[in-house]
Amino acid sequence: MTVVFAGHEVEIDHEGYMQKPEQWNKEIALEIAQDVGINELTERHWQVIEYMRKRYMEAGSAPSIRALGKESGVAIKELYQLFPKGPAKLAARIAGIPKPRGCV
Amino acid sequence: MSVETWSAPTETPLSAAEQIGKVSIIISKGSLDGVYPGLIMANGARMEGIEANVFFTFFGMDAITTKRQDNIKVATVGNPGLHMMTWLGSVPGMSAFATHMMKKEMEKLDIPPVSEFIEMIADSGAGVYACKASVDMFKLKNEDFAPCVNDVITVGEFYEMAAGGHIIFT
């Protein structure tokens, strides 16, 4: 379905994950972050979000939590501090990429 | 294409009582196929924002024992799921071979080795506990355990910790 995030029309699935990453921008990210209960995006949040997008663009899928912890430059412990309700899912949602489907 | 105002997901949201808020997972087996399911469930719970505790007991204790945790094997005898004849499964080296193959496949899926996986689970905020009865039975000491093990607890303490959540026995 199409909804309006930060004044832009975007395609999302029924859980709110953007289906077209190219429609994403930073204002949209801020609005989604607020929706999922993260009121401020720090430099560390952005580092994770940018890694998620880069990885998705390169590999066509979201990273596993293990890869996220090893390759984003933010370790697992901090990932859970930044995104307490689940880093892989929340960062994917804020980064404007489809929902990660992996089990790990 | 209709433009809607985004509020919450459109699926009927689950009430607080229907959502899983906490899981306590018991790992009691000491084979690779006995240990991994519980670890995947624990890690998966944290990934969903669900509170998780992992309690290791009996042969599952190998998974948190530093010397043993990365030497856990697939049983090739008495394991019908492997579809291997008993005599073949008992050939020396067969268990090591099956273990090697399984680890290779898991690595492809980005499933970490046991020691790294448990550390990851602990870092994700899950509690990692050893069973007091098993510690006494196997005569283990604190220094035998991986550093991420929070505590050695009794069954009673486990139930206290598990209260209000779901218990998964593996």
Image: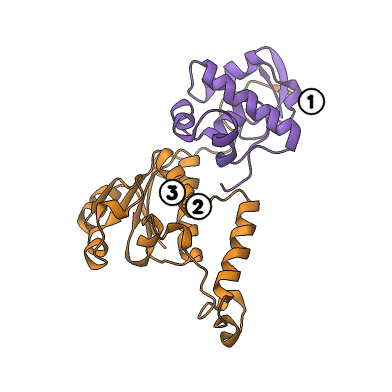
Judging by colour alone, the chain drawn in purple in this rendered image is A
Residue under label 2:
B40
Q: Please give left or right for residue A4 compared with residue B34 in the image.
A: right
Q: Residues within 10 Å of mark 1 (few under 14, many from 20)?
A: few
Residue at figure coordinates x 47%, y 62% from the top left: B71
Residue A12 visible within the image: no
Q: CA distance from mark 1 to mark 3?
A: 47 Å
- Which one is earlier in the sequence, the residue at label 1 or at label 2? 1
Between residues B28 and B156, which one lies in front from this camera angle? B28
Chain label for disc 2:
B
Q: Is residue B47 above or below residue A8?
A: below
Between residues A89 and B2, which one lies in front from this camera angle? A89
Q: Quadrant of residue B132?
A: bottom left
Judging by colour alone, the chain drawn in orange in this rendered image is B
Q: Quadrant of the C terminus of chain B?
A: bottom left
Residue under label 3:
B118
Residue under label 1:
B1
Residue A64: image x %, image y %?
60, 41
Q: Quadrant of the N terminus of chain B?
A: top right
Q: Is residue B69 above or below residue A59?
A: below
Disc 1 with disc 2 on a shared chain: yes
Disc 1 with disc 3 on a shared chain: yes
Residue at figure coordinates x 61%, y 48% from the top left: B110
Nearer the observer: mark 1 or 2; the answer is 2
- Which one is earlier in the sequence, the residue at label 1 or at label 3? 1
